[in-house]
Image: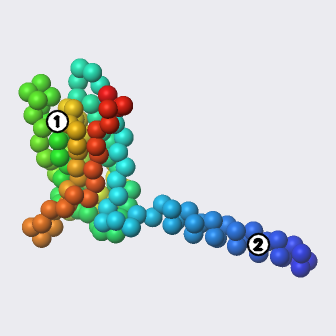
Amino acid sequence: MSPKRRAVLLLGAGAVGFGGIWYRELTTCEELACFEFEYHGADDVASFLDIEHTGGTERLRAGDVFVTNVSVDYEAGENDTVAWAELDDDLGPDDAINGETLRIPIRFPDLVTVRWRRDGDEEVVGAWVYDDDER
């Protein structure tokens, strides 16, 4: 292989490697847990909120993660805090929520939080705040 071709290949491989490192730095979650939220509004039934666990530094068990303001009875206007494991039929309480997406019914709450309970303490690890432009 000619030296010129070898140099081009090495530069190309280096660019791809540095591009991968740059992309990883932009997408890496440095928090305990990171979540993305997507709102789906409805008029006469409960609206839905998709919650996706996108990463983090801790392994979160589905039985230790709770979601607030879940609509448990739309007609009666009842909301409750429910464990991720109870909302996801595919996960048990000891399973990790890594990369999982959850769709919950909500009835016009201004705030939905994702809470993590460990050793008797509770910590908010994610939150979605209602935006007037969404309704």
* CA separation in Å, label 2 and label 1: 55 Å
Res. 25 mark: none
Q: Secondary structure at mark 1?
A: strand
Residue that lies at the very extreme toward the bottom in this rendered image = 3
Q: Between residue 47 and residue 124, name the one nearer to us.
A: 124
Amino acid type shown at disc 1: Ser
Q: Residues within 10 Å of mark 2 (few under 14, many from 20)?
A: few
Screen quadrant of the C terminus: top left
Can you give x and y, in whole percent of width and height, for residue 82 in the image? 15, 47
Res. 11 mark: 2
Q: Secondary structure at mark 2?
A: helix
Residue 29: image quadrant is bottom left
Residue at the image position 20 percent from the left and 32 percent from the top: 107
Q: Are marks 2 and 1 in contact (CB under 8 Å)?
A: no
Residue 121: image quadrant is bottom left
Can you give x and y, in whole percent of width and height, for residue 11 in the image? 76, 72
Residue at the image position 29 percent from the left and 46 percent from the top: 128
Q: Measured along the vertical axis of the image, is residue 14 above or below residue 45?
A: below
Q: Measured along the vertical axis of the image, is residue 76 above or below residue 67?
A: above
**Residue 95 visible (yes or no):** no
Residue at the image position 63 percent from the left and 65 percent from the top: 19
Residue at the image position 37 percent from the left and 49 percent from the top: 36
Q: Between residue 131 and residue 106, name the one nearer to us.
A: 131
Q: Between residue 130 and residue 29, name the one nearer to us.
A: 130
Can you give x and y, in whole percent of width and height, for residue 133 in the image? 36, 31
Res. 71 mark: 1
Residue 99: image quadrant is bottom left
